[in-house]
Image: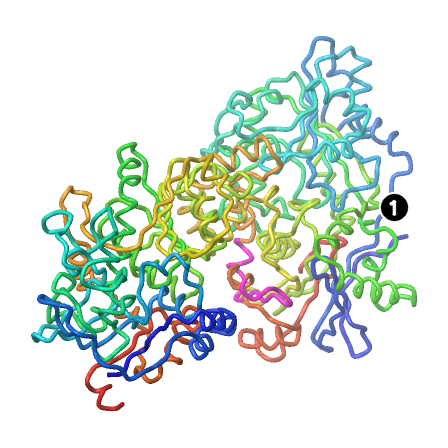
Amino acid sequence: MPRPGFVLDVDRSTPPILFWRGENFSLEKLPAGRSRVIYPAEPLPAIDDVDGAIRHALLNPIDHDPLPSLLFPGMRLTIAFDDVSLPLPKMRRPDVRQRVIEAVLDLAADAGVDDVHIIAALALHRRMTEAELRHAVGDRVYDAFAPRGLLYQHDAEDPDNLAFLGTTPHGEEVEINKRAAESDLLVYVNINLVAMDGGWKSTATGLASYRSLRHHHNPDTMHKSRSFMDQHRSELHKSNWRMGKVLLDSGVKVFQIETTLNTDTFPQPFEFLSKREWEWNARDRMTFLATTKALGRTPARLARNIFHSIEAPHQMTSVQAGEVEAVHRITTDHVYAQELVEVKGQTDILTMGIPYISPYNVHSILNPILVQVMAMGYYFNMYRGMPLVREGGVIILTHPCRPEFNPVHHPSYIDFFEQVLADTTDPHVMSQKWEKRYAEDEWYRHLYRTGYAYHGVHPFYMWYWGTHGMKHCSRVIVVGGDPKTVRRLGFVPASTMDDALEIASDVVGRTPTITHLHTPPLMVADVI
Amino acid sequence: MRALRVRRRTAKFAVARVASTFGSGGAARVGPIDLVDIEPPALPGPGWHRIRPRLVGICGSDLSLVEGHASTYFEDWVSFPFVPGHEIVGDSDDGRRVVIEPVLGHEARGFAPPFPGAAPGDGDDYAHLVGGRLEPGIQTGFCCSTGGGWADEFVAHESQIHEVPDSLSDERAVLVEPLAGGIHAALLTWPKVRAATEAGTVPVVAVLGAGTMGLCAVAGLRRFVPGVRIVVGARYPHQQALARAFGADVVVAPNELSRAVRRESGGHLVGDHLSSGAHATIDAIGNSDSIAEALRFTRPRGRVVLLGMPARVSVDLTGLWHRETELVGSYTYGTETLPDGSRRRTFDLAIETALVEPLDRLLSATYPLDDWTDALAHAGAAGRRGAVKIAFDLRPHERENS
């Protein structure tokens, strides 16, 4: 039986705690008597018969007719699937999306359906490479569909292939992929790694255009999402759910398939990253020492390649299909069962080690803007109830925060860093002053549509993601970051954790409470 | 009189070039320049005046000479030994406070001007620069007949002299000459700016470098080239602040300039080149890297104005060929045609500009002539040390102290 997550109160016997620092780690000693460490739960057991469970879900959907009854000859069937941003790290083959899509295609073939399109629902993310597509859907599906142009990627900038479906009562325009909207059935294949994923967000975000996305990817919506991991208190989700109703009312027929994975994140020899420090054996300690020393001497590019080659031993813990909202309720329960950790009360200082990866830099660089979104957008929001850090508290994160960008994946990020952040770090100001120009830049549009670039507006969305966190905290301190880059982000640089705590004392006094979020693997703090 | 004098000593130039690796001060100590006590130059003829300098700037071209980097091109256009110094405000022997337009033009050499009312820098035949009643020399500060500003005294022809109004301080007046150079470069962008404006687009001019000349070019663009969007690449924070104060719209670090130009002008980034780019670029640095950079972000059939004095450079000109880029030198000043069609002398425009622009902030430090090695060292490291323009102060109080 896997052990649940728990909160460790740090005392003098507590060993130094592991902090991620991009493509490396460090061990940090936290002050005894007023520090605590939140550890994630151990991975839940996997489903033994994955293919059987998938087939069972398709034949016995929730609040929906069985999939075979929805399939008929001559129909137009569209299968959309989550893109390269999920799961993290990428899972070992076969990817769960491949298994689900193959099962759906088997049923479609049985029903004589021959008009099938498969679409990567990447919204404004970069397009996936062939290797990434093959990894996600498998070689058999790829070879059967891609050469004939039937497996492709959503293009949020293709006016000929977008369908405007109406507006919500709040005036939010709903525009999604035309093929998906006009199909007789849209089957959405999801991976739900955190509670934020899935539900109507799959379709209303993953298959949407900028025109539509801007209604919920904005500073106001992000600021009112408390948190992204708590759908009922997330304005982001409420907007997506409103859009989902427009989809339904306009006749889009969705069959939602959601899967959850356990938190088995790191294979050998990186298993020690998931272990609790006092349980490290001699081999773990040796591996840590050898790894950190070696990584310290390894060029950043090579270190990145090493880490991005990791394939997680994630395993499926649930699969459910049917009506979107009913399915998502069960999915969320499964996610919470894996990730929720009960935490009593808030803290003055929240510490976090930022790893090498985020949903937006698979096979790429975690650039400074993505460091921000990981800290203030994701880790800050890993709560239910109330934020882990009190209002006016301090966040201390560890990351080298180098001014490095992947010009292929993140071209507009470079300009955002050089131009927008040099002007303002206020999400509301930049949204008014700069967003439109980036969203409509022809070069960014060209690179998004034809290359492997995130959409021009994407760095803004990343910055907005941290709106609540940045307004909530009085200071963000980056340990070990490039000082000039850290200042450009509006944060405060510190050389060591001790220096950071000293700097934080201006705000939270000399004996603040400290909480460390020991992630990854993923967790959500249920703060009561 | 005291004078800093440069003699033709090839070995000294070579030693200076090596020593310049350690800074301009070191190069000055071992190079071809010395502080000497010499007789003042004789008046070459009628219309000539004795000038006692007040403030005299140290220019990039002076430094390049002191450091042994100047091109051999000038060997036939100057006469040794000469006294450098051409950014001058001083007192004329007839009681006027004047700035000097340094080009030794037709009238100074006893020739008829190329057209009535021509400025010293006008004309399309430079034969007069090596003839007439003076030894060869393109301008004051490079001619053994006239002397130069880095001395207690030199001579200047009436055609070179501009009386300055009382309201113009010495500290501003010493910058009139570089300001004229900047204005001239700015006006060289006008044909491209006009074409862009007529095409209904916002004209973009990039300025590479924000030392004295770059900043003066920015001031010239803002004042005399209407409707232009100015994007500046400036290395140091104080340069960036000054560029903004002089009217630049966008100021970025040099390594960010290419992308900043794209943001302003649109287009794509194709490899290292912009698909489009600035309508014109003023290169106020003038080395291989800056020229290559300017060619990369100036749009096809645009113009690169080379304001910084280059020497021998190595540049891949394939892009220039392919994009049909105009590479235009911008040495000095003369008679300008302004956007409204009127004709004005650059020095008059510069004096007008010096009265209104915040030029005081450009003159960072002054030195007595006796501290010439320190002055040259400071000038050579001006950007790094938070300075812009370094000058010699030869005003009476300084003379009394020396």
Q: Is residue A424 visible?
A: no
Q: Is residue B47 above or below residue A308?
A: below
Position in image of residue B343 (x %, y %): 14, 47
Residue farthest toward the bottom in the current orientation of the protein: B401
Q: Total of numbered circles in the picture?
A: 1
Inspect the image, locate mark 1, and give the three-letter code of the amino acid beneath it.
Answer: Pro
Q: Residue at x 73, y 44 (%)?
A: A193
Q: Quadrant of the C terminus of chain B?
A: bottom left
A494 or A301, which lies in front?
A301
A520 or A92, which lies in front?
A92
Residue A479 on the magenta segment? yes
Q: Is residue B206 left or right of residue A217?
A: left
Position in image of residue A167 (x %, y %): 48, 29
Q: Residue at x 52, y 53 (%)?
A: A467
| Magenta stretch bounds | A467-484
| Quadrant of residue A328 within the rendered picture | top right
| Pointer 1 residue | A45
Q: Quadrant of the N terminus of chain B?
A: bottom left
Residue farthest toward the top in the current orientation of the protein: A74
Q: Is residue A6 above or below residue A407?
A: below
Position in image of residue B86 (x %, y %): 26, 67
Q: Is residue B287 above or below residue A67?
A: below
Position in image of residue B301 (x %, y %): 38, 36
Instruction: Describe the element under mark 1 as helix, strand or loop.
Output: loop
Residue B263 on the magenta segment? no
Q: Residue at x 70, y 8 (%)?
A: A74
| Quadrant of residue A64 within the rendered picture | top right
Chain under label 1? A
| Quadrant of residue B370 within the rendered picture | bottom left
